[in-house]
Amino acid sequence: MRVVITDAAKADLVEIGEMIRPHNPTRAMAFVDELLNRCIALA
């Protein structure tokens, strides 16, 4: 299976990270990385 992460999905990930960052910058980056890795793992 091939997983395509669209520009809209990438923008959503950035937005999620930006929402979390003021409260916990380190966790924001890690959380977005985890979400992206799970998307990639679908393949």
Image (tube, rainbow, N blue to C red):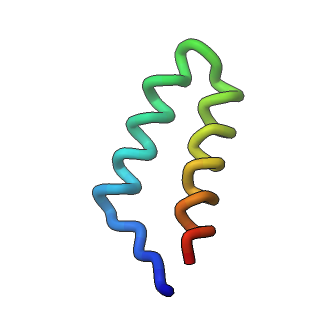
Q: Is residue 23 above or below residue 5?
A: above
Q: Horizontal placement of 4 versus 24: left or right?
A: left
Number of numbered markers: 0
Q: Horizontal placement of 20 versus 9: left or right?
A: right
Query: Residue at image x 50%, y 86%?
Result: 1
Q: Residue furthest top?
A: 23
Q: Residue furthest bottom?
A: 1
Q: Nearer the viewer, residue 35 or 11?
A: 35
Quadrant for the C terminus in the image: bottom right
Query: Residue at image x 32%, y 62%?
Result: 7
Q: For residue 29, which quarter of the picture?
A: top right
Q: Is residue 1 above or below residue 18?
A: below
Q: Is residue 17 above or below residue 20?
A: below
Residue 18: image x %, image y %?
46, 29
Residue 24: image x %, image y %?
64, 18
Query: Residue at image x 62%, y 68%?
Result: 41
Q: Nearer the viewer, residue 21 or 43?
A: 43
Residue 13: image x %, image y %?
44, 46
Q: Horizontal placement of 20 versus 6: left or right?
A: right
Q: For residue 27, which quarter of the picture?
A: top right
Q: Horizontal placement of 27 versus 43: left or right?
A: right
Query: Residue at image x 55%, y 23%?
Result: 21
